[in-house]
């Protein structure tokens, strides 16, 4: 189910990017036709022609787009509930914990390299086999500290998407300003009555703006997607950690202390 959701999200993002590039190309083609009265038909503008007409700012914007694609691929490989808390490993650890087999829980935690097992292993290092109930606060503190470090580790590449969300519009705006400066320079040199002379600079400004916004919107969408995925994984793992510790140190576990008979009975009033 999670895999299907990701495929649908990628499909929607690809459609939006295609529609945006198509609309920008159509706008550029229309502007070019309007600038030449002799042309009766709308000239067809390819994507590469549109990119070249964007001017120098398309180079940093192109770099930003490549980095966004790379970050999306990397985060899909890293930030995944299936990989961070694998169901098979979690089920095996819970089964061993329910029988009080602390050694088996430790072996399973150290034999698999995942977010859940690394964090649990850090907590198991603080447990005292002879007094598991008394050592539980230290175990929980170690798990909490390790989980925080692991969250920062997985969120490292996710945060770069937020950086590109802010950086891409800035590059687009800089390209827009550059194009408008060129347009006004030509107006000052006597090109006021010749719109075909200004079309190139105006097109450069609009393409830079559209490209920067397109990259920022895409990066923002994936940033919140991966951030929400990471948050949901952290919340789900808390429940698994609690269940394992309850089995090892809580009531119903192998290390629980049996209740004294008659201790909980209410004494009748005299």
Image (tube, rainbow, N blue to C red):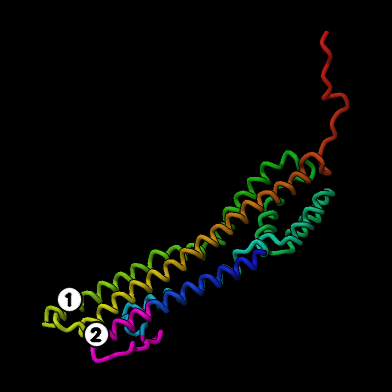
Q: Position of residue 141 (x, y in %)?
A: 63, 45
User: Which image quadrant for residue 230?
Assistant: bottom right
On residue 219, which mark appears? none
**Precedes in sequence: disc 2 or disc 1:** 2
Residue 162 is left or right of residue 120, and the answer is left
Rendered view: 161 above or below 124: below
Q: Is residue 248 left or right of residue 34?
A: right
Front one among 110 and 179:
179
The image quarter containing residue 225 is bottom right
Quarter of the image for the N terminus: give it. bottom right
Between 219 and 230, the residue placed more toward the observer is 219
Give the Cα distance between marks 2 and 1: 17 Å
Q: Is residue 193 left or right of residue 135?
A: left
From what the image shows, is residue 24 above or below residue 79? Answer: below
Residue annotated with mark 2: 35
Residue at x 77%, y 59% (from the top left corner): 108
Task: State the extent of the magenta-drawn residues as a range.
Answer: 24-49
* In the image, residue 40 lies in the stretch drawn in magenta: yes
Mark 2 falls on what kind of element?
helix
Judging by the rendered image, the residue that carries numbered circle 1 is 184
Q: 10 Å neighbourhood of mark 1: few (<14), some, or many (≥20)?
A: some
Q: Position of residue 116 (x, y in %)?
A: 68, 57
Q: Is residue 192 magenta?
A: no
As drawn, which residue projects farthest toward the front?
40
Percent position of residue 178, x then y: 25, 75
Q: Residues within 10 Å of mark 2 (few under 14, many from 20)?
A: some
Q: How many marks do you count on the picture?
A: 2
Q: Residue at x 11, y 82 (%)?
A: 190
């Amino acid at each position: 189910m999670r895999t299907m959701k990701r495929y649908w999200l990628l499909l929607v993002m690809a459609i939006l990017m295609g529609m945006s590039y198509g609309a920008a190309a159509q706008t550029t083609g229309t502007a070019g036709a309007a600038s030449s009265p002799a042309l009766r038909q709308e000239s067809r503008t390819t994507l590469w022609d549109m990119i070249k007409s964007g001017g120098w700012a398309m180079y940093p914007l192109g770099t930003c787009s490549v980095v966004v694609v790379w970050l999306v691929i990397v985060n899909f490989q890293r930030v995944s509930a299936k990989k961070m808390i694998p169901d098979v490993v979690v089920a095996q650890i819970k089964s061993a914990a329910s029988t009080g087999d602390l050694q088996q829980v430790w072996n399973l935690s150290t034999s698999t390299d995942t977010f859940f097992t690394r964090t649990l292993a850090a907590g198991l290092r603080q447990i005292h086999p002879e007094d598991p109930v008394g050592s539980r606060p230290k175990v929980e503190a170690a798990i909490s500290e390790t989980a925080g470090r692991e969250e920062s580790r997985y969120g490292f590449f996710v945060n770069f998407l937020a950086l590109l969300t802010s950086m891409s519009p800035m590059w687009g705006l800089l390209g827009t300003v550059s194009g408008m400066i060129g347009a006004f320079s030509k107006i000052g040199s006597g090109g006021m009555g010749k719109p075909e002379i200004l079309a190139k600079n105006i097109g450069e400004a609009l393409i830079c703006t559209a490209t920067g916004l397109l990259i920022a919107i895409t990066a923002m969408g994936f940033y919140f997607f991966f951030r929400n995925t990471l948050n949901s994984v952290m919340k789900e793992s808390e429940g698994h950690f609690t269940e394992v510790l309850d089995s090892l140190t809580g009531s119903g576990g192998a290390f629980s202390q049996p209740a004294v008979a008659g201790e909980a009975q209410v004494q009748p009033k005299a």
